[in-house]
Amino acid sequence: MTRIINVPTNVNDKSFEEILEQTSPLPLDEKLLIDCRHCTFATPFGLTALLSLGQTRLIKPSFLIPDSANVVSYWARADFFAHGEEFFEFDKRTARPRARSNSVVLECTPITKSGDVHGIVDKISERAHEILVESLHLSPQITSRFTMALSEVCQNILEHAGRGGWVAVQKYDHMNKRRNVILAVCDVGIGFRQSLEGSHGRRLSDRWDDAAALEDTVMQGVSRFPDKGRGQGLQGVKKFIGQNDAKFSVRSGTARLAIVPSWDEDEALIRDLAFFPGAQLQLTIPERIVAP
């Protein structure tokens, strides 16, 4: 029997929970039909998380692509279908994009080795000034810090995931709203809790769970590496967030932690979510409001 998974119209870091609530209880070898026909929007998190979901399944899910030609075109330009062919059986063939979108800063890109991270950083560096200074009105000095933050979250996959992951970056020019850039990095590796449990001499408290592991890693800077200074990449990202009024969220296992700026109303810590392996991160950088 094939289980139908209904995908929400807007696929983002919040609504992806609706997908996981449907898939988490199911055996990994159960046949799925992922119904995206009614999708009208997907963030970088949504696309990379869908690819990550495909990686977890032992039998290729069937996949109904969006009805909207505009949405299909965007997903194609973001290279979702090109990579998704490995994990899904799409109901329709999609044309290869003839031109890249200016809003797609970085297409869905696999990360499996250090060379991938260097290539991603080099590619982003070429557009960093346009994205951050011209579009978001940030200081020119911020470009190197942004590429460093990007490098750190990508490197996190190689050091903690135990397998490859995905990264994507999108620029949004909202009408009558603040522009922003969203960076998403997703993997289905061992996750934060298991990574810390494997560290030498790690003492586990009675309240030890995925949420505690996220608090230790993101907020306290705890690392599985005994070497001083190693494994502190997320602390650099945390510093970048504080300097740029940005938002950062991390999901791992059954918990989600967010560093929430004043312009957002997200919950700082959520426990008891549907289980999903690995770690899924999102960084949102808003436009700096320039006084007239």
Image (cartoon, grey):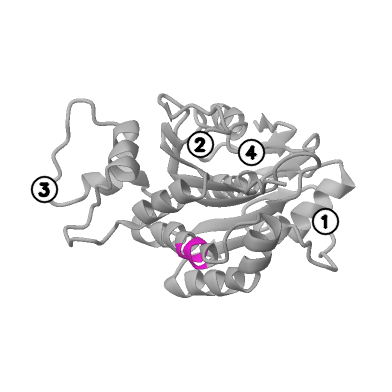
Q: Amino acid at mark 4?
A: Asn
The residues bearing labels 2 and 3 have C-alpha atoms spaced at a distance of 35 Å
The residues bearing labels 4 and 3 have C-alpha atoms spaced at a distance of 37 Å
Foreground label between 2 and 3: 2
Element type at mark 4? loop
Q: Quadrant of the N terminus?
A: top right
Say which residue label 1 marks.
93
Foreground label between 1 and 4: 4
Q: Are marks 2 and 3 in contact (CB under 8 Å)?
A: no
The residues bearing labels 3 and 1 have C-alpha atoms spaced at a distance of 52 Å
Horizontal side of residue 58 vs 88, given as left or right: left
Q: Are marks 4 and 3 in contact (CB under 8 Å)?
A: no
The residues bearing labels 2 and 4 have C-alpha atoms spaced at a distance of 18 Å
User: Residue 49 location, x and y as percent?
Assistant: 58, 45
Sequence-earlier tag: 2 or 4 = 4
Say which residue label 2 marks.
261
Return the residue found at the far right.
Answer: 69
Q: Amino acid at mark 1?
A: Arg
Q: Are marks 3 and 1 in contact (CB under 8 Å)?
A: no
Q: Nearer the viewer, residue 133 or 101?
A: 133
Foreground label between 1 and 2: 2
Say which residue label 3 marks.
201
User: Residue 195 location, x and y as percent?
Assistant: 29, 48
Question: Which residue is painted at 18% across and 61% down in the image?
Answer: 228
Q: Residues within 10 Å of mark 1 (few under 14, many from 20)?
A: few
Q: Amino acid at mark 2?
A: Pro
Label placed on residue 12: 4
Question: Which residue is painted at 87% across and 43% down in the image?
Answer: 68
Q: Are marks 1 and 4 in contact (CB under 8 Å)?
A: no
Return the residue found at the far left.
Answer: 201
